[in-house]
Amino acid sequence: MRRPLCVAISTVLVMAFSAAHAEERANLGNFPITLKIGFINFMDEAWEEGDVKYSFYPGLEGYARVFRNLYIGGEFGYVNSEELVDAFLGMPIGHNRSLTFLPIELNLKYVIEAAPSFFIDFGAGVSYSYASVQEELYLVTHYSLYDDSAWLLGGQFFVDLTYKVKRFLVGLNWKYQITQSLEVDPLRSSELLGSLPPSLQPLVPQILGFDVFDQADYSNFRIGGHIGVTF
């Protein structure tokens, strides 16, 4: 975790140094604001099971020019990815895993006007994100297997392609983000497993046919589009 954060910080410093020596100023405006719509892919193996690995991602970002081609700003988004529970004779049978992720980012980006009205942004930054995971068991009635959450430090790198028409912006974006791991303690937070003898607790997930993990990170890859306006 330390190495990617150091790389992100180093990238930010390099962009700041480059901006200080830039001779041309990219005409992206002083305060671009965009709405981002795309898809997110969580990289940890813990999310392989079920349908929680991929999800829809909406986000909002805003930046302010600080020096020529250098912008500082942030982004926040929201993800709720959930695995569906099977039904048998009208009754829910199985287990349901869901994750929630709210990234809050502070970024620097360097903007290049590659062609008239066409811009390429390179950026990096740090993040502090809320993450949670829930696992629920449905056997006629409902049991909570675990429910844990935490705030996770992270860092990200990204590239944006933007076309500007007067004050309006439209484009594509790519981002890779790394985060700390969320520690999960099923025996502490589970009303079902905690009520069983310790010798039987590890057998429940095996009998029901799913994995219980003790930690997972929320590192992710995002790709999508954006629309916005600049002032």
Image: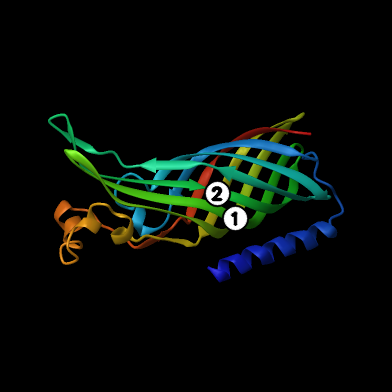
Determine the residue located farthest toward the bottom in the rendered image.
3
* Residue 141: numbered disc: none
Q: CA distance from mark 1 to mark 2?
A: 7 Å
Q: Crowding near pointer 2: few (<14 within 10 Å), some, many (20+)?
A: many
Q: Tell me where residue 172 sits by quadrant.
A: top right
Determine the residue located farthest toward the front in the rendered image.
195
Q: Crowding near pointer 1: few (<14 within 10 Å), some, many (20+)?
A: many
Amino acid of disc 1: Ser
The C terminus - image quarter: top right
* Earlier-in-chain disc, 1 versus 2: 2
Instruction: Tell me what residue is drawn at x 80 percent, y 40 percent.
Output: 30
Determine whether, in the image, residue 47 is placed left or right of residue 57: left
Amino acid of disc 2: Pro
Give the mark count: 2
Determine the residue located farthest toward the right in the rendered image.
23
Identify which residue, 181 or 63, lies in the foreground.
181
Q: Secondary structure at mark 1?
A: strand
Q: Position of residue 92 (x, y in %)?
A: 20, 36
Instruction: Tell me what residue is drawn at x 56 percent, y 70 percent.
Output: 2
Q: Position of residue 138 (x, y in %)?
A: 21, 42
Q: Tell me where residue 34 sits by quadrant.
A: top right
Instruction: Tell me what residue is drawn at x 55 percent, y 49 percent.
Output: 103
Q: Position of residue 179 (x, y in %)?
A: 51, 59
Pointer 2 residue: 103
Q: Secondary structure at mark 2?
A: loop
- Kindly indicate whether the residue at mark 2 contacts the one at mark 1 (C-beta within 8 angstroms): yes
Identify which residue, 123 or 105, lies in the foreground.
105
Pointer 1 residue: 127
Identify which residue, 216 or 35, lies in the foreground.
216
Instruction: Tell me what residue is drawn at x 70 percent, y 52 percent.
Output: 109
Q: Position of residue 203 (x, y in %)?
A: 16, 61
